[in-house]
Amino acid sequence: MVERKKIKSFEDLEVYQKLLELHLEVSKISLKFPKYELYELGSQIRRSSNSIPANLAEGWNNKHINIYLEGINRAFGEYQETLHHLQVAYRKGHIDKDAYLNYRQRYEESAKMLRGLESALMRWKAKKGER
């Protein structure tokens, strides 16, 4: 039997930890983009990758489950935007294929975890009879 760790904070969520780590890595690599991209593509990818875990943190422990679900929905939008920026960075030659595929795979894995969190919250909401 697997013992589950009690989640006391958004920081305890495995998906949050993975997304934060991804943001830190993407941010670091974006600072190596050419100077002309630092405040264009670099800034955009840093902001969108940071917004994914930030939206989880913002909605955490809200009295209204719909607000947390909306935060997860916004996180998905930022996830899609980040994938777009990664593809542009790859196609412009700012990151190599291996880095691009690695980030993409890890973001897709995190997106599946976000869907799992969303599903769990929806089941909890239905069980409590919330609208």
Image (cartoon, rainbow, N blue to C red):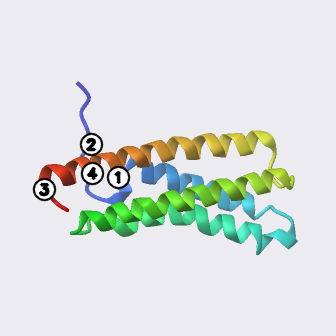
Disc 2 secondary structure class: loop
Q: Would you say 102 lies left or right of 2 here?
A: right
| Disc 1 and disc 2 in contact, CB within 8 angstroms | yes
Q: Residue at x 86, y 65 (%)?
A: 34
Camera-near label (2 vs 3) is: 3
Describe the element under mark 4 as helix, strand or loop. helix
Label 1 sits on residue = 12
Q: Amino acid at mark 1?
A: Asp
> Which residue is rendered at x = 38% and y = 69% of the image?
58
Residue 70, image x and y in percent?
38, 65
Tell me which label, 3 or 4, sits earlier in the chain: 4
Give the class, few, some or many, for how many residues have Cα within 10 Å of label 4's Cα (few <14, many ≥20).
some
Q: Residues within 10 Å of mark 3 (few under 14, many from 20)?
A: few
Label disc, if present, on residue 5 of the rendered structure: 2
- Find disc 4 in the rendering and name its residue: 122
Q: Amino acid at mark 3?
A: Gly
How far apart are the two marked residues, 2 and 3, measured between alpha carbons? 26 Å
Mark 4 vs mark 2, foreground winner is 4
Disc marking residue 129: 3
Amino acid identity at mark 4: Met
- The Cα atoms of the two marked residues, 3 and 1, are separated by 26 Å
